[in-house]
Image: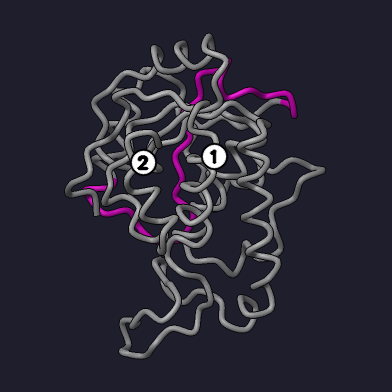
């Protein structure tokens, strides 16, 4: 199912919607197609696959995408959109990875809990991008956080508002550089060696608009998180 919201009142929680994102023109590999098929077959909820052809269907009239969006890599477009969708609509999100879990019980659990988000318990090695003493604290506290590859969020919460505002702050600061050095590879990141052997001038770090923002916020809101076995399979997805 790939149905755009019928109104600005669309609620991803009450509709039990699980979002997936494929934001660029790249052709999915056989592994990705198999993973996507597993999501449609297994989650037992409506699935909204948002791609470059239908993303505008999900953009609220009064809340356009950030002006930096066209210059982002496909990976960073996905990072941005999962934030945008979780704030404005809420609901579920999963990476396109093999999934074997039914999701209705997770929606029901969060809906009746009064909490802000539900996900699988983060692993210590899932937080390598936050450095210094605070990064060490996050890694020690990983069992209190949830992972970034599959989750459910209540919409328009203080958590999602801070998340989106901080993402926009980063993109505001880097808009000029992004316009000068837009992504040239689906997984572009600052300083990476590109397939042609040159060093990328793209200004965003790999986790700069997802993990570097969301993990610290999850620590701040850790009392408002729920943990559940919602993780996809992390192997052989590319």
Give the distance between the C-alpha atoms of the residues marked 1 and 2, in whole angstroms: 11 Å
Residue found farthest to the right: 62
Task: Identify the residue at image location x=32%, y=33%.
Answer: 121
- Above or below residue 95? Residue 229 is above
The quadrant of the rendering that contains the C terminus is bottom left
Q: Is residue 66 visible?
A: yes
For the residue pair 76 and 209, the one nearer the viewer reads as 209
Task: Identify the residue at image location x=36%, y=54%.
Answer: 136
**Residue bounds of the magenta highlight:** 7-32
* Secondary element at image label 2: loop
Taken as a whole, is the magenta stretch helix, strand or loop? loop
Q: Position of residue 192 (x, y in %)?
A: 37, 79
Question: Of label 1 and label 2, which has the lower sequence position?
Answer: 2
For the residue pair 219 and 191, the one nearer the viewer reads as 219
Task: Identify the residue at image location x=51%, y=24%.
Answer: 17
The residue carrying mark 1 is 220
Q: Position of residue 10 (x, y in %)?
A: 67, 24
């Amino acid at each position: 199912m790939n149905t755009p919201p019928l109104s600005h009142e669309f609620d991803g929680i009450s509709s039990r919607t699980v979002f997936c994102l494929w934001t660029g023109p790249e052709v999915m590999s056989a592994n990705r197609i198999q993973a996507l098929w597993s999501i449609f077959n297994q989650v037992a909820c409506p699935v909204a696959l948002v791609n470059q052809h239908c993303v505008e269907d999900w953009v609220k009239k009064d809340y356009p995408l950030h002006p930096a969006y066209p210059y982002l890599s496909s990976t960073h477009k996905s990072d941005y959109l999962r934030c945008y969708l979780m704030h404005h609509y809420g609901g579920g999100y999963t990476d396109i990875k093999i999934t074997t879990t039914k999701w209705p019980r997770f929606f029901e659990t969060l809906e009746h809990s009064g909490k802000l988000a539900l996900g699988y318990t983060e692993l210590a090695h899932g937080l390598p991008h936050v450095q210094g003493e605070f990064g060490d604290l996050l890694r020690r506290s990983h069992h209190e956080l949830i992972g970034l590859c599959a989750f459910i969020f209540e919409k328009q919460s203080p958590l999602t508002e801070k998340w989106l505002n901080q993402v926009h702050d980063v993109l505001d600061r880097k808009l000029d550089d992004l316009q000068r050095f837009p992504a040239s590879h689906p997984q572009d990141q600052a300083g990476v060696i590109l397939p042609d052997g040159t060093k990328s001038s793209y200004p965003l770090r790999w986790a700069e608009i997802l993990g570097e923002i969301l993990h610290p916020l999850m620590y701040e809101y850790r009392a408002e998180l729920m943990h559940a076995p919602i993780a996809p399979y992390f192997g052989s997805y590319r």
